[in-house]
Image (cartoon, rainbow, N blue to C red):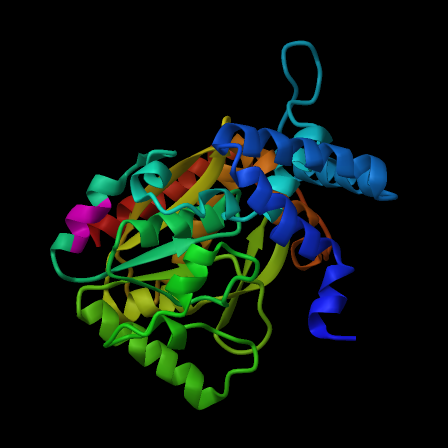
Amino acid sequence: MTSLSRRFFTWKFHFYEVLLPMLRRLGPARFDAVVRTVGAASTFIRPGRRARLKSAVAAADAALDLGQDSEGRRRFDWTGLAANAARFTARDYALDVADDDDVLNRFEVEGYDEFREELARGDGAILVGSHLGAHIAGMHWLFRNNLPIRALVQRPKHVSNYLERQFDATDEPYPQRDFFLRKDLSASAAVERIMQARSALRGGMTIYLNGDIVWEGSNTRTCRLLGRDHQFLAIWNELAALTRSPVFFLFCTHRPGGRFALEFKNFGRTSSGDQHRALAAYLSELEVQVAADPSEAVAYLTWPCYTTGSLEPSPKRRGRRRIAAETRQSSRVG
């Protein structure tokens, strides 16, 4: 049996190569509505799906103390998580159109002016992304804006044709194709990636990394997210301390009607010895984002790498917001 024949009998083939391209012709609002419906419908088809989502909701409630609404109902339920799971899986397929303006107009963007001002200083910048919400759509926006950017991440799968072309780019002096991380990278290749990133930053470019990668091995730091301790890949904060480049946290979430919210949050600069504090500040900010809309936290509430280990209640949301804000302020002063 050929590779294509094997793929034909998987749900991914029909979802990514048949359903999503067909839905894209309906326009962003209808695309979004149908995908959300698919997410809800999946709970009737997949055995145990509802139970797992309800358990995820309970874990989020325990970690974040989400509370109840005025009528005593939990503010967050499993139906929103189910709908967003399908949105999350659809990646950036809704944005795979030729017109840049059409795509960019679907985003409500905050904090970009401050980021652009920092980049204009010529010192380069570090963007720390995550697996929250519409994170692939956020990467799509970055490339559509023709920013001088390279993504130092594991190459995402099942993305739009547009992003695939960006990922395969061989533009000099730092081809994106040669920037991706892999777990099987040799030590020499890993060092080469870091040196490339350092050189690109000094040349005034932007390096995009994810700050929430659970990792085993070297270059990690242990920190807490949603009540559980994990080892996180700590490349971004080491690179920030090494280069003293400004750091911005980047969050992208879904909005109704096939729209997105993209937020740049200025962390400032960090120095040697502050790497762990920088990671803790990032994860505190990430928890604030999750608490604002837990249905966007599909990865953190359902992926085994985030849900294994004993769960302990996190600090109250107000405390997390205060810690993150104080750390950002001290980093800017420093």
Residue shown at 43% from the left, 86% from the top: 189
Residue shown at 57% from the left, 58% from the top: 158
Is 273 on the left or on the right of 68, as rendered?
left
Q: How many tags in the picture?
A: 0
Residue shown at 33% from the left, 54% from the top: 143
Residue 332 visible? The answer is yes
Q: Nearer the viewer, residue 120 or 90?
A: 90
Q: Which stretch did the figure color magenta? A: 115-119
As drawn, the residue found furthest toward the left would be: 121
At which x and y percent is residue 33? 60, 29
Asked if residue 152 is positioned above or below residue 138 in the image, the reply reads below
At which x and y percent is residue 181? 47, 73
At which x and y percent is residue 201? 23, 68
Q: Residue 116 lies in magenta, yes or no?
A: yes
Q: Nearer the viewer, residue 97 or 255?
A: 97
Is 200 on the left or on the right of 22, as rendered?
left
The quarter of the picture where residue 60 lies is top right
Asked if residue 250 is positioned above or below residue 12 in the image, the reply reads above
Q: Nearer the viewer, residue 274 or 48?
A: 48
Residue 277 visible? The answer is no
Asked if residue 289 is positioned above or below residue 232 in the image, the reply reads above
Residue shown at 17% from the left, 70% from the top: 203
The quarter of the picture where residue 205 lies is bottom left
At which x and y percent is residue 191? 39, 84
